[in-house]
């Protein structure tokens, strides 16, 4: 047996791979977010549709509420001495802004949890075409 | 020992340490959300664009802060977007022995993340926008003041 083959045999039991996924909060529903109408929707109605926010920020007499969710996908390739790891996190975010009468004035949303991918650190992910294909698959995102 | 004979010995030593779980190397990448393109930020016009237009252009921020609160409780706001796309090599040394405890790790990850921030006045008109490291963008924030004497 050559020396290289011997080293290979010693390292072989150390090789392996692992995948992990972590979700924080439920992804936001784009249809529910679209139902929020500035100038009309009240804070009470927002709570009825989306539940309790993650964060409330006081802005003088105004306030802003944050709703969010995140998905993390991790990939690790164990090769004994050297390991390769990739961690990809994408989030859904919604900020709703209320005036002093608790009526919605502005809303801003971003939907990204469905774009999270398992990959190795040298792989290209999140190209425009890839993101567009994943957007099309998420219910309610592309009207 | 000649260099030619030392190389296999070094490799064997590294292999033995690796097999004992004492040394490992890592090449890792961590990505968090998507960067705001600089070109999109440059299209925003301070003094002209408002909160609604900026939210439509950039999507929801990661954080919102109270900004410039007046005596009548009128206030502006600052919106922060943050992202991460880092990759680098790392080495970890550790001791499995009960007599020699401890571990040492080294990596090339940055300590601050890139981001961008937009400042709006009480009329919700864009006052300024900046791209940079989050630690620098938030440098204007002060820790909460101490409780006054009774």
Image (cartoon, coloured by chain):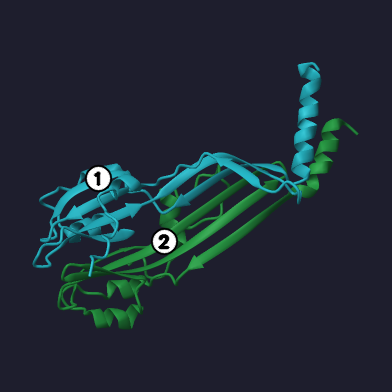
Chain colours: A green, B cyan
Residue shown at the point (51%, 59%) measured from the top left? A72
Classify B38 as above or below A22.
above
Residue shown at the point (29%, 54%) measured from the top left? B80
In the rendered image, residue A26, in percent from the top left (x then y), is placed at 44, 72
Classify A45 as above or below B90.
below
In which image quadrant can residue B12 be found?
top right
Q: Which mark is residue B130?
A: 1
- The residue lying furthest to the front in this view is B150
Classify A119 as above or below A140.
above
Say which quadrant the C terminus of chain B sits in: bottom left
Q: Observer-nearest residue: B118 or B104?
A: B104
- Disc 1 from disc 2: Cα separation: 22 Å
In the rendered image, residue B46, in percent from the top left (x then y), is placed at 14, 48
Q: Secondary structure at mark 1?
A: strand
Say which quadrant the N terminus of chain B sits in: top right
Instruction: State which chain disc 2 sits on.
Output: A
Q: Which residue is labeled 2 in the image?
A: A91
């Amino acid at each position: 047996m050559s020396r290289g083959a011997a080293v290979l045999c010693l390292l072989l039991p150390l090789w392996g791979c692992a995948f992990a996924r972590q979700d924080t909060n439920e992804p936001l529903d784009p249809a529910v977010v679209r139902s929020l109408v500035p100038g009309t929707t009240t804070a009470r109605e927002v709570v009825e549709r989306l539940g309790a926010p993650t964060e409330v920020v006081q802005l003088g007499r105004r306030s802003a509420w944050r709703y969010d969710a995140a998905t993390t996908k991790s990939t690790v390739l164990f090769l004994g001495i050297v390991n390769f790891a990739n961690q990809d996190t994408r989030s859904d975010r919604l900020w709703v802004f209320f005036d002093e009468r608790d009526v919605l004035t502005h809303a801003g949303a971003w939907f990204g949890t469905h774009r999270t991918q398992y990959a190795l650190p040298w792989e290209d992910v999140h190209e425009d075409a890839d993101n567009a294909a994943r957007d099309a698959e998420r219910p309610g995102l592309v009207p | 020992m000649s260099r030619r004979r030392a190389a296999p010995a070094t490799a064997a030593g590294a292999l033995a340490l690796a097999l004992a779980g004492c040394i490992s190397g890592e090449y890792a990448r961590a990505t968090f959300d998507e960067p705001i393109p600089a070109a999109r930020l440059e299209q925003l016009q301070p003094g002209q664009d408002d909160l609604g237009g900026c939210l439509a252009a950039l999507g929801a921020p990661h954080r919102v802060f109270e900004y410039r609160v007046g005596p009548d409780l009128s206030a502006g706001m600052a919106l922060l977007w943050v992202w991460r796309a880092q990759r680098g090599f790392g080495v970890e040394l550790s001791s499995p022995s009960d007599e020699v405890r401890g571990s040492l790790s080294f990596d090339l990850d940055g300590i601050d993340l890139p981001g961008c921030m937009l400042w709006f006045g009480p009329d919700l008109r864009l006052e300024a926008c900046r791209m940079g490291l989050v630690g620098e963008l938030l440098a204007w924030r002060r820790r909460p003041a101490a409780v006054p004497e009774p």
